Amino acid sequence: MNRTLIALLAALESLLAVGIGLGISLVPLSLMWAVQLDSGIGWDVFYRASADIWLVGHGVDLTITLDPVLAAAVNLPGADKPFLISIAPLFFSVLTILLGVRLGRKSLESGARFVGPVAAISTFGGLTVLIALSAINANAMPVMWMALSFPTIIFGLGLFIGARGEIGHSGGRAERVQQKVMGWAFGLPSQVRAVMASALRGGLAATAIVVGISAVVLSVLMIANFSSILGLYEGLQGGGGGSLILTAAQLLFMPNFVLWVASWFVGTGFALGTGSSVSPVGTDLGLLPALPILGAMPTADLAFGFLGILLPIAAGFVAAWFIRPALVRALGADQAVRWFIFVVVGLALIGGATLGLLAWASGGAAGPGRLVDVGPNALRTGGVAAVEFLIAGSLGMYAASRSQTRASTSPQTETSPKQPQF
């Protein structure tokens, strides 16, 4: 395929990626503007709000300065001064990564090596600069160095993930670099390679189990508490348009809510404001915004609530159980026992660090006053999860070894000749 055509197609894909992300918030806001033309608010205000939402969704901090009249109406401590919004609706970041993965795979498959990815990143970065500059306003000011870099970095990460499987077959410098990296990795002792691979698989598997089950539990809680959620909607009296906007906003934060439930299962819980706590040990809440989704959040009153802490224990146990056979095959039964402790420690550190990083990404400042602290504590969540994975991984390794020992001895017992009886 012609390189110019590949570059144009990659640029078009980047344009669509930005358009889809920006349009998710711009379309409903534009509909709200269209049905309220007599309000005197121009469409440019709704566009800037959409641009701010898109930027915040990619981790960009936003400084808000409310009008004195609006600040008085909000009636929150600190609303009369500039405050920070740093909690990101992770839906935007996840969407950007997935679109980048798709484009990265297609670009490298075209055989043009760097033409497609370079054109895609350049286009995405240029559009990000335009969006960031157009979002500048005295009442809502994004942190510019974040706005100019974070969305493009996230898109580039997705592009690299999608292209990584094709880089080794693309030829040129990219293939030589990958060959050097792989050569260095394969130059390590076989025991080290096996331990690193097993720890990485185990830690990521344990994290995936916790997050996946948390998503299922949140779905069940939303169904079980549908009446409470509906009551909160009715209490807000936002009308059809307001309820639609509120529902869309909550959907954008759904990955955050899943990670909050995961931190609840870990045992550290999450905060909904400074001084508040929602965890299996207890729930201490103050004045909160009436978000309907909060009616489905787990609390200490949940049936079998404290037993929820068994989830990360079970996840670490299962992950260790399933990675042990591959480790034994790689090292041999005699040598594998010596390395089990390193695998378990690596599993715990990787799993705890991953959950801590996800917890950090899911929280932040959501407003003035006590709303500056919303979400899980990243260090506490990662540290407790690492301890739980360490204990569970040790038990899983031990149980798997005992099971294998019984499996290896049982055939001999069954086939042993019976002694003649007289």
Image (tube, helix red, strand yellow):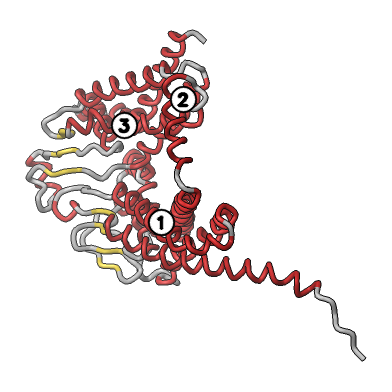
- Disc number placed over residue 153 in the picture, else none: 3
Q: Position of residue 26 (x, y in %)?
A: 32, 29
Left or right: where 109 falls relative to 300: right
Q: CA distance from mark 2 to mark 1?
A: 30 Å
Q: Which of label 3 and label 1 is nearer to you?
A: 1
In the rendered image, the quadrant that contains the C terminus is bottom right
Q: Residues within 10 Å of mark 3 (few under 14, many from 20)?
A: some
> What amino acid is at disc 1?
Gly
Residue furthest right in the image:
422
Q: Position of residue 299 (x, y in %)?
A: 35, 66
Q: In this view of the protein, which residue sits in the foreground, 110 or 25?
A: 110
Q: Which mark is residue 33?
A: none
Report crowding for label 1: few under 14, some 14 to 19, many 20 or more residues within 10 A (C-alpha). many
Residue type, mark 3 in image: Ile
Q: In the picture, residue 51 is in which quadrant?
A: top left
Q: Residue at x 48, y 22 (%)?
A: 108
Q: Helix, strand or loop at disc 3?
A: helix
